Image (tube, grey):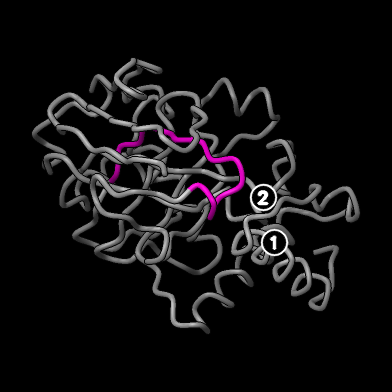
Amino acid sequence: MALDKQTIAGLAEHLESCELQARDTTKITDDHPGMDWDDAYAIQDEILRRKLARGARVVGLKAGLTSHAKMKQMGVDTPVFGFLVDSFCVPEGAEVKIKELIHPKVEPEIAFVLKHALRGPGCHIGAVLAATDFVLAGIEVIDSRYRDFKFDLKSVVADNTSAVRFVVGGRAMRPDQVDLRTLGVVMEKNGQIVSIGAGAAVLGHPAAAVAALANHLGKRGQEIPVGSVILSGGVTEAVSVEAGDHVCLRIQHLGSVSLRFV
């Protein structure tokens, strides 16, 4: 690690304050160009510690950067990961207040809910499917705290991979009931189709993202707990939203889920 504990704590406080106050900032590597991946995840961990100290509860985890093409473009060989707390979770059809966000975007996701804990190293797609209770349709609202959504990967990991809100719903299906690779995904904004994709856009198989998460945590002596909701990564590019927008996601066999922005 390149940063000391005091610097990590200060950056965590700064980034979380930006989230809670809905204000942007320049990326933190501008002032700390030498920070490494361990520093980035340490800052994220400190943000989580701050939330837990105020009574928040972890309800799940998320993967980002789950497109092979995007990973190659960014020069990395694994996705990035973040946490989900109860305050991020909103009900199906809920109204999300734009004033609480900076520059939100939405991503269509295939969400996994586990019946068994998962731990790496050596976790693979088969282990993920065996440990999965059911899958759901999900919409993640991402809202980078960085000005104009401009950041590098270490900065975005420190910022908990832009996590801010999510909803899961639709029809719960066991993983042996569907082919997650070929599930058709259609996202609409105000009744107009804005993105189309299939499950295979996520690392060739959405369960591969969950396996990568388990292996990442395994290196840190951690696991994915039973009952966790895991957002496996955006199936398509993120779409910007503003007040008045209604977003509806439909996933083949998994039904639909929606959000309204006010």
| Image location of residue 223, percent across then percent down | 41, 64
Marks 1 and 2, how far apart at CA: 7 Å
Residue 242: say if magenta: no
Question: Is 105 left or right of 61, judged from the image as shown?
Answer: right
In this rendering, position of residue 106 left or right of residue 220: left
Q: Which of 14 and 22 is in front in this view?
A: 22
Image spot of residue 146 (x, y percent):
72, 46
Q: Which residue in the structure is indicated by mark 2?
A: 145
Q: What residue type is disc 2 on?
A: Arg
Q: Mark 2: which secondary structure?
A: loop
Residue 208: quarter of image = top left
Amino acid type assigned to the residue bearing label 1 in the image: Leu
Q: In which quarter of the image is the N terminus?
A: bottom right
Residue 46 position in % (x across, y down) = 64, 72
Tags 1 and 2 touching, CB below 8 Å: yes
The answer to if 107 sits in the magenta stretch is yes
Residue 218 left/right relative to 6 = left
Residue situated in front as seen by the camera: 33 or 72: 33
Q: Which of 255 and 21 is in front in this view?
A: 21
Residue 38 found in image quarter: bottom right
Name the spot of residue 37 as percent of width and height, x first.
72, 53
Which is more N-terminal, label 2 or label 1? 1
Q: Which residue is drawn at 37% across and 61% down?
A: 224
Secondary element at image label 1: helix
Nearer-the-camera pick, 1 or 61: 61
Where does the magenta region start and end?
Answer: 98-111
Residue matched to label 1: 15
